[in-house]
Image (cartoon, grey):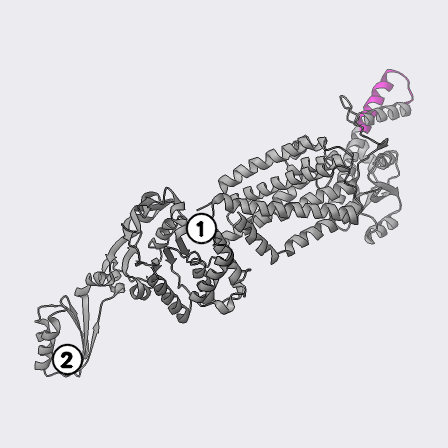
């Protein structure tokens, strides 16, 4: 049984359909990614799962029981890292963690120990007594995450947790997510940063305009656009015979020729290199460089929607 | 709920300035306003009678009957100097031709020397206008009456005119269909209305309303900090979130009202009567209702800035209508008196004055306290319905 099962979920805001009939399952122990541009419906989906919003239609089951009907089933087991910093700026990092620990019914020595452990995980131990208002953006993000970890959640939902922070803090957060997952925490991770989702997620849903447009592991998703592999060849000169010979190769779908450069689009990755090597060897042009653009999730999104992920 | 209370206490520790500031402001302003309006204070208004006619003298005579002002005759230079030096509010000049205008059935013209416009001057101007209209009408009635009687028989016209004028003047007075005399016996002494005490009570309640409404309005700041959403997805129940905020705001309100009552007692020697339980009952009812009002207002608006914009308008206007700034005894408008009944301030002031001024017993505050609590329950239900948990 899946840890979380989303069934035919819909959410309307007046005339806008923010989430449009989506279904997916999150298995225990995985890092599940929701990728999509701003406005794709990721945060709305996350808000419904975290019981902040009620869906217009559909259901969400946590361990087989509906959390739409009874939100209390999931709330104590859930850690939510919202997109915005959700902390009290006039309180210190310690006081913030203390309050959120209380909110999850952790008290006394256990709370003290958890604050110590969490502050070590998120790397803010030295600055815990400072007020949040004095923290940098990255530090605030770390406390924001820490507040969701105090009760050792079974399911951690992270909504764009790295927005607007420096690369060092970003890497630290990604490492933290991996470490938590290694210890058994299931993670739902939303982002519009393709690289982050590619780096940490075991399975990914790509969302656009409220719908799931593709779903699978990273490799499964990339397979969708494998035919669009691009090979960039540079020569000392490009002769007509070379172009003619390359055009005759069966698997080449498109050939873009500029002064000393030929960009080959291919729909077959298996045999194309052998054929290209044969043609180039026979020609009177000398190959000076070769560059192969492997498809990524950006290319998948572009292929499926005709738009770039960050449009 | 305890988590929310602890949180609010932690936050209050860093933000106690507003509480202290409002308490000091309430005390300071209560003292200043109370002192200025208590006792036999009467603003002096110099009158320059340039017409020196029979009617201008009648007009001055009528003005001098006013209990709230001290109208004195003087010359123009002296009147101008006193206004210029700020020794008097304003000066009234009765222009030449005053009597002629009345005889020609025109509204006579008077001039005012003043350096500013304020509520006290506007009130005085209203009094002058009312008296002018009365004079003109009375003279007309007296003239018509004199002409009519003198046309029938030979009479002393002057005498008839004066009698008709006086009778006309008398008829301006409101004839009450019945009169009620209320007496409260306190160890053989009569208690009287004390304006200073009234101001202290009114301002105590008025300023505490700000602290309370903005106290419960902190839930709007929670939305701004996104902590509201985080609390909703935590195991904290909605009841615990709202209850915690209500309880801490209520406690802060009670402490502030208590501090203001104690400070006025020991700093300004205000006697709060013999029923401490009665004063506490009214205070608790009032603070509960204002907390609920704050919850209701926080449900209507979306942000703390919007609350900060509408609260002064609502709190000040209802406090004015409810008699926190001045006694309702001076208000004649039936509409305003009806509206006063809809404000918790009116009932709280009335109940507290019953004890502090007329030495009433605990029984005298039960009815007004129940009305205040009833209002609070309505605001509370509306507030809960309006507060958004999504």
Q: Tell me where residue A22 appears, x and y as whole percent.
A: 28, 49
Which subunit holds the residue at mark 2? A
| Residue B387 shown left or right of residue B162 in the figure | left
Toward which corner of the image does residue B127 lie, by quadrant? top right
Q: Pick the quarter of the image with the C terminus of chain A.
A: bottom left
- List the residue tagged with mark 1: B234
Q: Are marks 1 and 2 on the same chain?
A: no
Q: Kindly tell me whether residue A35 is visible in this rendering.
A: no
Question: Alpha-carbon distance for marks 1 and 2?
Answer: 66 Å
- Up the image or down, A147 lies above or below B261; here it is below
Q: A64 or B190, which lies in front? A: A64
- List the residue tagged with mark 2: A238
Which stretch did the figure color magenta?
Answer: B138-156
| Mark 1 neighbour density, 10 Å: few (under 14) some (14–19) many (20 or more) | many
Q: A114 or A76, which lies in front? A: A114
Q: Does the stretch in magenta take in B153?
A: yes
SS at mark 2 in the image: loop
């Amino acid at each position: 049984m899946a840890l979380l099962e989303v069934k035919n979920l819909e959410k309307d805001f007046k005339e806008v359909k923010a989430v449009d009939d989506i279904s997916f399952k999150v298995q225990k122990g995985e890092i599940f990614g929701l990728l999509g541009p701003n406005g794709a419906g990721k945060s709305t989906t996350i808000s419904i799962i975290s019981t902040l919003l009620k869906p217009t239609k559909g259901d969400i089951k946590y361990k087989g029981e509906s959390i739409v009907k009874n939100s209390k089933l999931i709330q104590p087991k859930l850690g939510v890292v919202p997109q915005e910093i959700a902390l009290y700026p006039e309180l210190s990092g310690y006081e913030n963690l203390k309050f959120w620990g209380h909110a999850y019914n952790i008290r006394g020595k256990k709370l003290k120990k958890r604050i110590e452990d969490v502050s070590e995980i998120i790397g803010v131990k030295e600055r815990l007594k400072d007020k949040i208002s004095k923290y940098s953006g990255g530090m605030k993000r770390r406390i924001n995450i820490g507040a969701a970890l105090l009760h050792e959640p079974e399911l951690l939902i992270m909504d764009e947790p790295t927005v607007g922070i420096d690369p060092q803090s970003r890497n630290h957060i990604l490492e933290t997510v991996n470490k938590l997952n290694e210890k058994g925490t299931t993670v739902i991770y939303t982002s519009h940063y393709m690289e982050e989702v590619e780096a940490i997620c075991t399975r990914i849903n790509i969302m656009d305009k409220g719908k799931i447009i593709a779903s699978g592991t990273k490799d499964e998703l990339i397979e969708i656009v494998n035919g669009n592999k691009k090979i960039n060849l540079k020569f000392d000169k490009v002769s007509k015979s070379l172009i003619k010979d390359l055009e005759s190769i069966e698997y080449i779908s498109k050939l873009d020729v500029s002064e000393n450069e030929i960009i080959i689009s291919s729909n077959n990755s298996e045999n194309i290199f052998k054929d290209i090597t044969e043609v180039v060897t026979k020609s009177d042009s000398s190959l000076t460089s070769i560059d192969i653009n492997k498809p990524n999730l950006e290319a998948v999104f572009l292929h499926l929607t005709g738009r770039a992920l960050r449009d | 709920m305890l988590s929310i209370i602890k949180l609010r206490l932690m936050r209050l520790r860093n933000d106690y300035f507003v509480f202290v500031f409002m308490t000091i402001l309430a005390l300071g302003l209560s003292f200043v306003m109370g002192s200025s309006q208590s006792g036999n204070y009467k603003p002096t208004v110099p009158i320059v009678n340039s017409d020196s006619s029979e009617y201008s003298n009648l007009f001055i005579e009528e003005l001098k009957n006013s209990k709230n002002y001290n109208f004195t005759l003087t010359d123009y230079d002296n009147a101008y100097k006193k206004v210029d030096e700020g020794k008097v509010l304003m000066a009234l000049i009765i222009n030449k031709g005053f009597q002629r205008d009345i005889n020609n059935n025109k509204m006579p013209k008077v001039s005012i020397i003043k350096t500013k416009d304020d509520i006290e001057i506007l009130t005085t101007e209203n009094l002058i206008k009312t008296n002018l209209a009365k004079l003109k009408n009375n003279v007309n009635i007296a003239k018509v009456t004199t002409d009519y009687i003198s046309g029938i028989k030979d009479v002393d016209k002057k005498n008839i005119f004066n009698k008709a004028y006086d009778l006309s003047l008398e008829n301006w007075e409101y004839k009450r269909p019945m009169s009620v005399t209320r007496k409260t016996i306190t160890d053989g002494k009569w208690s009287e209305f004390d304006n200073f005490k009234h101001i202290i009570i009114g301002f105590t309640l008025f300023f505490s309303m700000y602290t309370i409404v903005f106290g419960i309005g902190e839930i709007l700041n929670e939305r701004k900090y996104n902590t509201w959403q985080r609390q909703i997805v935590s195991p904290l129940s909605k009841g615990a979130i709202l209850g915690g905020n209500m309880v801490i705001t209520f406690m802060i309100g009670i402490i502030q009202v208590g501090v203001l009552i104690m400070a006025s007692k020991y700093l300004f020697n205000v006697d709060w009567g013999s029923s401490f339980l009665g004063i506490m009952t009214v205070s608790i009812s009032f603070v509960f209702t204002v907390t609920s009002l704050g919850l209701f207002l926080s449900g209507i608006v979306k942000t703390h800035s919007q609350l900060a914009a509408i609260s002064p308008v609502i709190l000040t206007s209802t406090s004015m209508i409810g008699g926190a700034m001045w006694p309702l005894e001076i208000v004649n408008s039936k509409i305003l008196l009806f509206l006063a009944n809809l404000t918790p301030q009116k009932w709280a002031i009335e109940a507290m004055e019953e004890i502090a001024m007329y030495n009433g017993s605990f029984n005298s505050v039960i009815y007004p306290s129940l009305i205040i609590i009833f209002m609070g329950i309505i605001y509370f239900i509306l507030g809960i319905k309006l507060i958004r948990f999504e």
